């Protein structure tokens, strides 16, 4: 019920951080400032590295991440129930100053025994730690999560919120230490496609857009010394994050991605 990603260095990467090179040791792609480049090849997971809670890096647990009909899917058809096996699919190199554009939609029913908060819930992890430094049983990488949320039949539920596993940031001149902070976006119900863009300026300003509308602005992402996983990543007292890896989430609800693109920024 598992699949392994066919990447040049995946065998070495699965040995773990003590003996493996960093995930950025994969063959680098060419990215030009001011130009959008797709991170998806439209046919398979080449260039991406899966990591599921409880499984070694590189193992695509229960074939959850897959390409079908030209879109990247998070599928739970091979699952009987969800037992906390959170999944993250990492692009194989880090970024610092860039724009990320993702088009997503939620489909189908949530995997049985998925948490209530995980209904129509996914996201993109930005400023993430190198996946080779994650513990085997770690649930989420130290990162800034840009939440992708879908609404239920009633009630308001904005998307492009920010959650911060192992991190903190500044907004409106205040240090934000709570786990999740909502954006000002509308609520999107059903299986409609939604476009989220995030503009990242390293340790500077970060802006979240939904369907072209600015819904959130914040800055100065930092490692949280109170988080055990983040504390291990602090070197020479430096907590500021100027960049990191991008990962897409699998949290128990099926989701499709038809566009994942990056544009490096001139500055």
Image: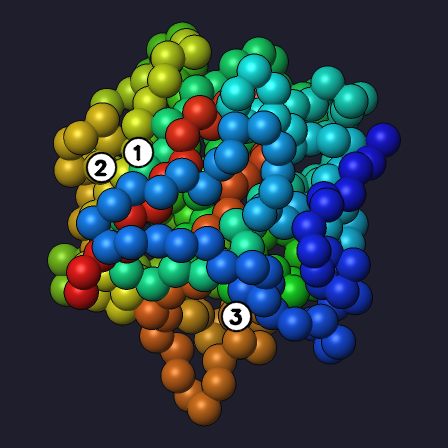
User: Can you give x and y, in whole percent of width and height, for residue 224 in the image?
Assistant: 44, 70
Instruction: Give the label, 3 or 1, closer to the camera.
Output: 1
Q: Secondary structure at mark 2?
A: strand
Q: Earlier in the sequence, mark 3 or mark 2?
A: 2
Residue 157: image location, x then y, percent: 34, 25
**Disc 2 target residue:** 209
Residue 146 spot, x, y in % from top left = 38, 43
Q: Image quadrant for the C terminus?
A: bottom left
- What colour scheme was applied to this rendering of the protein? rainbow
Estimate the x, y position of residue 102 in percent, counting from the top left.
Answer: 37, 34
Query: On screen, 147 above or below 113?
Result: below
- What residue lies at 69% left-to-right and 31% top-to-bottom? 64
Residue 118 visible in the displayed image:
yes
CA distance separating discs 1 and 2: 6 Å
Earlier in the chain: of badge 1 and badge 2, it is: 1
Q: Nearer the viewer, residue 227 or 3?
A: 3
Q: Is residue 135 left or right of residue 221?
A: right
User: Mark 3 sits on what residue?
Assistant: 230
């Amino acid at each position: 019920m598992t699949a392994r990603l066919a990447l040049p260095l995946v065998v070495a990467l699965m040995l773990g951080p003590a003996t493996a090179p960093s995930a950025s040791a994969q063959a680098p792609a060419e990215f030009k400032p001011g130009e959008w480049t797709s991170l998806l090849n439209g046919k398979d997971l080449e260039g991406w590295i899966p990591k599921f809670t409880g499984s070694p890096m590189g193992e695509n647990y229960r074939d959850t991440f897959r390409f079908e009909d030209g879109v990247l899917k998070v599928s739970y058809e091979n699952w009987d129930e969800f037992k906390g096996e959170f999944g993250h699919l990492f692009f194989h190199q880090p970024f610092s100053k860039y724009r990320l554009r993702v088009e997503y939609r939620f489909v189908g029913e949530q995997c049985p025994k998925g948490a209530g908060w995980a209904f129509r819930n996914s996201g993109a992890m930005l400023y993430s730690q190198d996946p080779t430094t994650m513990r085997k049983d770690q649930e989420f990488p130290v990162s800034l999560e840009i939440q992708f949320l879908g609404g239920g039949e009633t009630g308001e539920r904005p998307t492009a919120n920010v959650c911060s596993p192992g991190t903190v940031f500044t907004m409106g001149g205040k240090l934000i230490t709570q786990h999740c902070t909502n954006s000002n976006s509308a609520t999107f119900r059903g299986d409609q496609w939604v476009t989220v863009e995030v503009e990242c300026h390293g340790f500077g300003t970060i802006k979240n857009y939904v369907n072209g509308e600015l819904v959130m602005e914040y800055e100065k992402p930092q490692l949280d010394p109170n988080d055990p996983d983040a504390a291990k990543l602090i070197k020479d007292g430096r907590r500021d994050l100027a960049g990191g890896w991008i990962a897409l989430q699998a949290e128990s609800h099926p989701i499709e991605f038809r566009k994942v693109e990056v544009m490096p920024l001139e500055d």
